[in-house]
Image (cartoon, coloured by chain):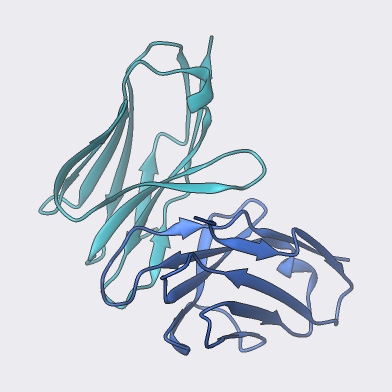
Amino acid sequence: KNEVEQSPQNLTAQEGEFITINCSYSVGISALHWLQQHPGGGIVSLFMLSSGKKKHGRLIATINIQEKHSSLHITASHPRDSAVYICAVRRNNNDMRFGAGTRLTVKP
Amino acid sequence: EAGVTQSPTHLIKTRGQQATLRCSPISGHTSVYWYQQALGLGLQFLLWYDEGEERNRGNFPPRFSGRQFPNYSSELNVNALELEDSALYLCASGARAPTHSPLHFGNGTRLTVT
């Protein structure tokens, strides 16, 4: 079993829809990251969380440390949000474990 | 402010050769992380350097090695290349450990081994 599990694996949405991507992990962590990877490979770090909730524009990330679960929400989705979203957990020894990613396609 | 820069963008090598990949962190960052993203596989942690020392490595054979220079830039060396080393290699930088700062990623080096 992977240490970091993401769901869904693929997600297609219509423009304007509310999107949720989930991440569950099974190891002790010091922080959780949500990453966005565009075609071509470039990665942008969206959030780093160790507790609670963070919001940036239309993106919201939450984490529940007790349940070892995090969610990434996108409100009013747009075709430019189409990308692979990756959940990554940073362990206490500073190495990282990555989820397999969620491929999001937002159709106009 | 310049972001994390990686070079080269693409690299083609033959099996058995050595590859050297380079990464320059964001100014002020002392930690450099290397990751491998092979086709069909997710991101995997390779190496972490901070203040010139290797702090941690992932589950990769010793032919994957690297170093960090006094200016905090870093090299990843892959010796005795194998076909399965073909992948996108990503570098990220962060603030001084153990502060768990957000990571900033480079655009990667795509290594092809033929």
Chain letter of the cyan region: A
Classify A87 as above or below B52.
Answer: above
In the image, B12: left or right of A68? right
- x then y, percent, for residue A105: 53, 24
In the image, A73: left or right of B31? left
Image point 52% across, 19% down: which residue? A79
Image point 31% across, 38% down: which residue? A22
Front position in the image: B26 or A98: B26
Image point 52% across, 58% down: which residue? B43
- x then y, percent, for residue B85: 72, 69
- x then y, percent, for residue A71: 26, 38
Looking at the figure, which quarter contains the C terminus of chain B?
bottom right
Chain B rendered in what hue?
Answer: blue
In the image, B39: left or right of A8? right
Classify A105 as above or below B54.
Answer: above
Name the residue furthest front. B1
* Residue A27 in which image quadrant: bottom left
Classify A16 as above or below A69.
Answer: above
